[in-house]
Every structure is written in structure tokens, then in C-alpha cells.
Image: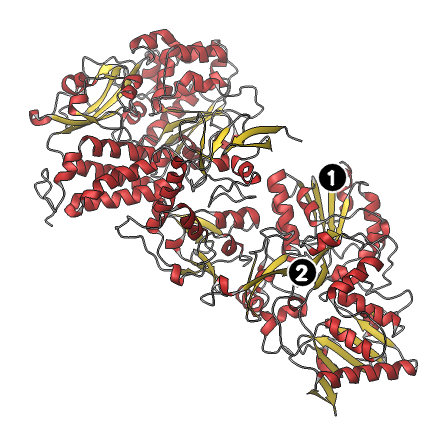
Amino acid sequence: MYNDPHPAEVQVLTRRFRLPNSQSIETYLANEGYQGLQKALAMTPDQVIEEVKASGLRGRGGAGFPAGLKWSFVPRHSPKPKYIVVNADEGEPGTCKDRVLMEYDPHQLIEGVLIAARAVDAHQGWIYIRGEYRYLLDIMDRAIAEAYQRGYLGPNILGSGFDFDLYTHTGAGSYECGEESALLESLEGKRGIPRIRPPFPAVVGAFGSPTVLNNVETFCAAPTILLRGGHYFADLGSKKNGGTRLFCLSGHVNRPGVYELPMGFPLRRMIEEVGGGVPGGKKVKAVIPGGSSCPILKGDEIDIPMDFDSLAAAGSMLGSGGVVIIDEDTCMVKLAMRIMKFYQHESCGWCIPCREGTMWLKKVLVRFHDGHGAKSDIDLIGELAQNMLGRTFCPLGDAAALPTISIVKKFRHEFEEHLNGARCPYEEHARPR
Amino acid sequence: MPDLVKLTIDGKTVEAPAGTLVINAARSAGIEVPAFCYYEGLSLQAACRMCLVEVEKAPKLLASCTLPVAPDMVVRTETPKVAEARKSMLEFLLTNHPLDCPVCDKGGECELQDMVFRYGAGESRFVEEKIHEPEKQWSPVVYYDMPRCILCFRCVRICNEGMGVGALGIVSRGAHSEIAPNHGDHLECDECGMCIDICPVGALTSGAYRYKTRPWEMEHIGTICTHCGDGCKTTLSVRNGKVMRGDNRDASGINGEFLCIKGRYAFDFLDHPERLGGPLVRRNGKLEPAGWPEAIRTVADKIQEVRERGGSFGVVGSGRTTNEENYYLQKFARGYLRTGNIDHRRSGDIGALLATGAPLATAADLYRAAAVLIIGADLSQQHPFLAYQVRANVRHHGARVYVVNPSPTREENRATRVVRGSVGELREVLAKENGLVVVFGDCVQGEDVRKLVEMLPATARYVCLVDYANSRGAFDMGLTPDPGALGLGQMITVPLDFLWVVGANPLETASRAAGFLVVQELFLTETALQADVVLPAAAAYEKTGSFTNTCGEVQRLKKGPATPGVKTDLEIVSLISRRLGFELAAPLPEAVFEEIRRSVAGYGISYASFISGGAVATRPPAGQAGGLSHIRSSRDSMFQSGTLGRYCGVLQSVREKDAVEVRV
């Protein structure tokens, strides 16, 4: 098991995780499994969508787009086949929730996919699992095989006349393939670069057909929503930010792990109470609130409810739920460098600003952290990131720019401390000039 | 007709059909929006981000190359925000782009240079290490320099979409992305050079032009290619009378941005070491150099002698000499020599097509037609531009393509139906095609042409394929035997008293039968070696005049380089005729063309369109019989061009390398 539960948790999606044989269909069926689907099959597609809309469910991958609204964009009466694609690429640094959802309750995901399929009249779907999650492939395939065996997948599911086929498909190590349109390109066997939007996947998705593409966690919420009602789910969270979400605590925290908490849960409580505070009793210097693509929060900015709207108002994002806690002995310059190294490595290379910008920024930050930086480089870093912002083909450029800009702005003094060959104050073994 | 959308661009009211991209709407209003990756006709990318513009009510700058016009849209292309964005894109590009200008062949015609001049970022803030990789050679002609590459992917798209070959791809990712050839370290492709021309910078450069000169040192002359019958415009860049390179810089011809290996590189025959530089006269059984006066005199005296004793003449013309030259040749032959034994190597039954009165199609029609039927031709090999048009038609308009051919051809990749037998098998489905263009090779001739036209819908339009640059013009100008007279095949076996061969090689595998043989040629071909008098002629690239392509479109040639010691065929015929007292007007191509316009049926075209560089469709009337000639296409591959092709080093080197197979 990944970590012990915490009493503050509201276990909805994770309620079956710690049951023995939680992966098996037997356990699933004995614990409300596939009941949401039964309800959905008795409803019309429009009714299913209305229920999901009522839940206030917003995409759990990072963008937070209302799920019910997205599903309603699918032109159901189009002669083209409709598809469901699950984004299980989970590439956002700091995020580790989709893996536990698939590992400990794979059938919940299958049921969620089926409910979405019912909502848009889809009969085929794929789960795109990142290549690094190779071990989950077997788990997922086994669950799918069980579902076929028992008649929850395949033709005439539960005698409803509704057919659905589900397949797993792996990625091969590209963060950009977690971006929905690049994921579709990869699924189709092409180079993993993003597509021109519009049209959006709901209208032109996999193989030119209307596609519902959502994050694992988003689909996993659907069975509960159908079973207990949209309002039940909405009331678990805060206004306009319905439901619970899985938060991933990592970094300098005593109890790292995945915790399901209501939307709007206070960040400070999350760190101190749920996470057990910072090891060694150190102070929190900064927090990445939802994956490395978010603007960073300072230690004195953590009195904030963790939901989409509150974080947006504070100039950051709820993102993917990847909460990374950073203690007072961490070099922020090194953090900025490490983050930029990631984006440079993952930049697909399609557009000029991201391709060249991340490479340039990485090189400057490496040089700077090494102690070979000049004062003008501090402003240069901010300017280059600003030059990428809003001008790239897909949000990866923004994802690289936003944290960088926020780190330079909020921790400028640390950059100044690295000038003139000064030894990094936070590294015991900084490189001498 | 789509609705017109009204929008404002930089304060100007612009009206454009719905679906127009903002970048094009701007261009139509005279506003230039910079772009590297956007290229008309190729798939959209929005990757380079140079075309970002401000749109009112939009939260961020938008790429105008993928933004369709919307009613009441307000676009601004020259604001401080836009200027800053453009400058920063260029600054980003220049981080890894090497400062190679002094040694880069593209200098002076480089789009990156132009943009930096216009939009800034000339001074660099980048002090890190650049990504470097040595330059690679992918084929005799194609070089790739990865650091210079701005990853606009025009080359990949033109090769894949435009040419249907797909020999270029992208490997690795991020700033380490680079273009890669289909065979790992080298290219196996059509060697058309489109990738080199379309590259905005010096990432892809031509090995044939490497380090030779600078673009501003040359004069760039747009003329018509001398090889196949498609009629592409090619640009010869000339310095001091010598062609330094060929490309498609002047893309104003019917072929737009298209040009194949022949049009682009096969000009090297011009200074082949065996190029004739002076006349040759046979004395005592040996061909010996002679001056022009002596050579002309010898020919004229012989003509007079044969004419006076009522001897027989024969004239074999060329599919590569100009309309003006062919017109004069047959005028002299019929008017002075009083012979109807006139012919040229015929490769398609134009006469039979014209006799049906069926409508003709132009090259542009191949791009716009709802459906195209190809009979008995490997278009990509023999008529690559027409193939390009068909391919673009399928790509842009979803046109239907029907192929009737005994063996596989590249057109089948996108064909609706493919038949190995006869057209008749498609009779039913073709009957439903209302906008059909039919392209047929030499397998359809004589009566079969009439039967084909009768079988197909009356709305169908036709192209009769002929081999060479002016094969069609040769027919139109009358280089065909009079009724009852001798055709080409007979002229070389019957012992005529005087046989005059202009720009042809009919005795390639035969011995002469004629009493006296005069040959006008560029080289000592098999026919020339057997001549009594060899007159060195100027090549098409060295002349002004006109060619008519296989679709019947007449276009203007512009003189490029000059070779000392040769004369144009027009001048030669004129000199001989003047010496004999037969009045032909002065050998000025413009004057002769005027005469053609007035007296050749179907050529009464608009002179203004012609002289301004356009392609004007001609429509000779039905009833041009053309006599009973043997009609057979040479079926040149993309690396062959009849006898002329043997003297093109670039074609020979590619053929040796690839051991000639038909590329599908």
C-alpha cells in the first residue's frame, strides 16, 4: 500500500483501496461496483450528462475544464463513431494519483469509461498509459479481461444492447503526450506533437472522430456520481468546485502519499496535519500547489483553500494535485534549474519559443547555479520566460514559463546570492568557481 | 461561392470568402505577415509562431495562418506587442542558428536574414554553447546542415504531400530535432530538389551550386524547361553568360513552386565538353571544321542543285526547337523546297484528338477537375508536373483519380479505381463523372481516340501526352507530312536526295540512306556523325521564342546564357533561305510569333498575356490530319530526356547510382 490513510480524508474514489484483493472484480462487485453503470444504462445519454454537470466535476488532469460540459460537446448524431480515451499519461512532476487509482481499483476506471461511453454513444475506447507505468499494464489488462468475462465489456453489456470494447495502449516516455492532442497523435501511431485547435477532440479526436478524452481521476468519479447523484458529489467540495480530489503530497514532508480530500481543503492543514509537517521541524519555504507547471507559492502564502478558483485568484493553479513541499534549506535557483531541465527535455520541438526557449533557459540556469551568472542574467531569465508565455503552440511553453517567472519574482534575493561566483548557500558541496 | 466575410485588418476593411485564413486575407490587402512554416498548398502547422497577430477580444496573440476570418473581426498586425513577439521568435531561432552567413550559400536570398533585417534581434544576448553537428550530404545534390535548420518542416511536407515521395522525416525531439533522410544516412528519391528550393534558410543546399557564387552576382532568367512536355518555368541564374544554377526562384509559371530534377539541374548539357562550337563540313569523307559562310554556302548550293534537277527533299524537325523555328522550317520546306516530306518524332496522336473536336484541358484544369482519368502513362515519371497537379487536386479537393495502366504507378496511391486492362472496364463509373479530365499516352491513337471520346461524357476534357518541351508546338506549326507524303520512318529509309535534320536523332540506330544530309544539332550525335554538314545550334535556354506544352498552352522563352560559335535554328534557316533568295521575314522571334498569331489556326491568342509571361491556351481546329506517322512515346523516366539527356551529367550520375527502376 502506498501510504496509511488519514482521518481527514473523505474516501470516495479511494474507498475500496485497502480492501483485500481490491483489484478483483469480485471485490468490486461486492462493494457497489458497476452499479453506477446500471443506472446510466437505464438513463438517456442526455440525462447522464446532466448528472455529471450537476456534480460540478472539473477535469482532474490539470486544466480543470467542466467534464459534463466537455461531454456535451460531442455531436452524438454525427455518423462517425465516437471514442473514449483515458489520459493515463500522468507526466506532471509531483503527480502520482492516477497510478494508485489504476493499481488499487482498476474496475472503477472501467466503469467510469463505460458511463462516459453511455453519455456520448461511444462503443470503443483506449486507456493511454505512460510507458513508465509498465507494471500497471498487466493490472489493467487483467481487470479488462475480468470485465469481458463477466459481461461488463463487449457486446450487449448487462443485456442492455450497449456494446463497448476497451483497450490499453502505452506511451513511450514523452510528457508532451499527456497533452490531449499530442496523446491522440501518439495513439494514432504518429509523432507526439500537438494539433491545431479548433477543432477540439470532442468534435475531431481519435482517428478523426468525436472523442471524450479525460484524466483517469475524472472518469473514476463518474460511478459515484451516477450511483449517489451529482449533488452528492458536488456537496463534498466547495462552491463551483465540486467533489473530492486525490492530492499527492511529496517533497519535504513527513508523510508523503496520496490523500483524498474535499475540494477547498486548506493547504496549510494539508501540509501540517495530513502530511505531518516538514521533517526536522523545518520551515516551509515554498510549495508547488499542483504540479511543477504552476506558479509557486511562498511559505507565507499557504493559507489558501485548495480548489480551482481560489488558487487561480492567488495567481497560481490547482493543476494536477501534485503538492510538493519545499523546506527552508532548499536552493530555489536549483529548483528553477531542475524544473527547467525537465521542460527542456520534454519539449517536443514543434514550435520555436518552447523549443529554443526552454533550451536557452536551461543553459542559463545551469550556468547560473554553477556560479557563473551575471546580474543581467536574472532579468534575462524572467524576460525569456515571458517571451515564451502565451506564444507557444501548446501549454507546455506556459508550463515552463510560469514557475520560472514566479520563482525569480518571489525569490530574487536567492538568485542575487549566487552571483560573483558565490558558493550556493544551500549546498554543502557547491561547485567552486 | 462561399459568403464574403467583412473584417478589419490594420484599420483597412477587408472582404474575404468565408474560410480564408487571416494571413491570406491580410496579403490580399497588401499587408505582409511574416511566416516560416506556413506555405500555401501545404498542410497547416502554426509551429513557427512568426505570424502571431493581435485580435481584439482575444486574450493572447493568435497565429494568423490557422485563423479563419470571422465577421467584424478586428486584426492588428503592427502593434508593439506583435513587434516584440516577432523579435523574440527570431531571437530564439538565432540561439542555435550559426552565424554562417559569410559561408552559407543562402546568403542574400535567405528568409531568416530578411526577417531579422525587418523585425530585429540582430544582436544576440545568447552566450551559452550552441548545439552543433557537422553538415551531412544525403545525395549528390542534397546537403543538410542541422544547426542552420529552423525546423519549419517545409521540406518534409513538400516531399511527402507535394511530391508523394515522403523521403524526409523528423527524428529526435526538442532542440535536438532534425530532419532525416529515408535511408538513414542518404536519400533515395526523385532528386527533384524541391526541398532545397523550399528551405527558407541554408539548411538544405544544392551540391551542384555549392560555394560557386552569390545570388546578386547572377541574372535570374525565367524561361521554359527544355525537357518534357509539361511546360514548367525554370529559373536559370546566369553569370557572365554561363548558367551557374537552375532553380524555381521565379515561381510565376503554371508550375508554381514545382520543378523536377530535369527542370532544375539538367542544364549542364550547355557546357558539356562535346558541345559543338562551330560548323563541320565533310571533305574527303571526314567531317572537318569550317566557317559559317562556307557551311551555309555548302548547304544552300546543294539545295539549289537538288531543286533544279527536281530531286527529293525531306525535313525532320524537333520537339525541342521553338514554334518560331518550326514555323519557319516548314514554311521554307513547303514554300521553297516544295516538299511535303516534313515530320518530327511524334509521341502522341494530337491530330486524332483535335479531329474529334473534344474540349481540351490545361495544366490548371488538372488541379481543379472533380475527377481525373489517366490512361497508359506513368505520370510521375514522364510528366512530373502534371502528376503534381493531380496529387495536389486530390489533397486539396479530394478529387477522384482513375488509373488505367498495365503496371503500377505512383498515382495509384491515391486512386479511386485502378484497372490493368482497358478503359471500358470503367465505363459505368466514368459515365457519372461530370467534370472529368482525361490524360492519355501513346497507347490511345488513331481510331481509339475517337472511340474514347465517344465512350466518355461529353463534358470531359482531354490532354494528349507528348514527350518533349515543344512536341505539341511542332505538330501545331505543321511539322507533319502532307497527305501522301513521307513520314519520319520512311524519310530515313528512302534514299532522298537531301535530308535536313533539325534537333533530332533519327539515325541513332540506323545508317543514312539520303544522298546529302544536313544536321542542326548541339552535339555530334549518331545522326550528326553521318552528316555532310553539321550546323551547331543554340539550345532552347539560349533563345527567345515560344514553346507549346502538351496541354496546348503556349509560353514565352527568355534567352539565358550564350554559347559562342552557335546560331539559333531560326537564324540558320533564315541565312540559308536568304542566300537562296526565298524571303522569310527577319529572324526576330517576336516578329515571327506575330506572323504565327496571324496565320496559324488556333494561335490567334492574346499577345499581352503571352508577352507578360502567361501561359495561353491554343485551340487548333479539328481537321489537322497529320498524316500517317508512326506515333510512339519514348517513355523517358524522370532521369532520362531522350538524346539530350545523355549529355546531362547530373541525370547520368543519378541513373548510375540508382540503377534505374521505375519509382512507384
Please provide percent x and percent y for residue B213.
47, 66
Q: Is residue B596 left or right of residue A122?
A: right
Q: B140 or B426, which lies in front?
A: B140
Which residue is at 42% across, 19% downward?
A: A150
Q: A309 or B64, which lies in front?
A: B64
Q: Secondary structure at mark 2?
A: loop
Would residue A33 be seen by someone viewing this image from the given angle?
A: no
In the rendering, which numbered label is found on residue B228? 2
Q: Secondary structure at mark 1?
A: loop
Above-or-below relation of B169 to B574: above
Q: Quadrant of residue A264?
A: top left
Please provide percent x and percent y for residue B504.
73, 71
Q: A255 or B262, which lies in front?
A: B262
Please provide percent x and percent y for residue B507.
75, 75
Above-or-below relation of B527 to B618: below
| Distance from the alpha carbon under mark 1 to that under mark 2 | 26 Å
Which residue is at 60% across, 71% downward?
A: B269
Q: Is residue B270 left or right of residue A258?
A: right
Q: Which residue is mark 1?
A: B435
Q: Is residue A124 left or right of residue A58?
A: right
Using a 10 Å C-alpha cutoff, classify the residue at mark 2 as few (fewer than 14 neighbours), some (14 to 19) or many (20 or more).
many
Q: Can marks 1 and 2 be said to lie on one chain?
A: yes
- The subunit carrying tag 2 is B
Kind of residue at badge 1: Gly
Q: Going from the N terminus, do you reach mark 1 or mark 2 first?
A: 2
- The subunit carrying tag 1 is B
Q: B563 or A86, which lies in front?
A: B563
Q: Quadrant of residue B306?
A: bottom right
Please provide percent x and percent y for residue A73.
48, 20
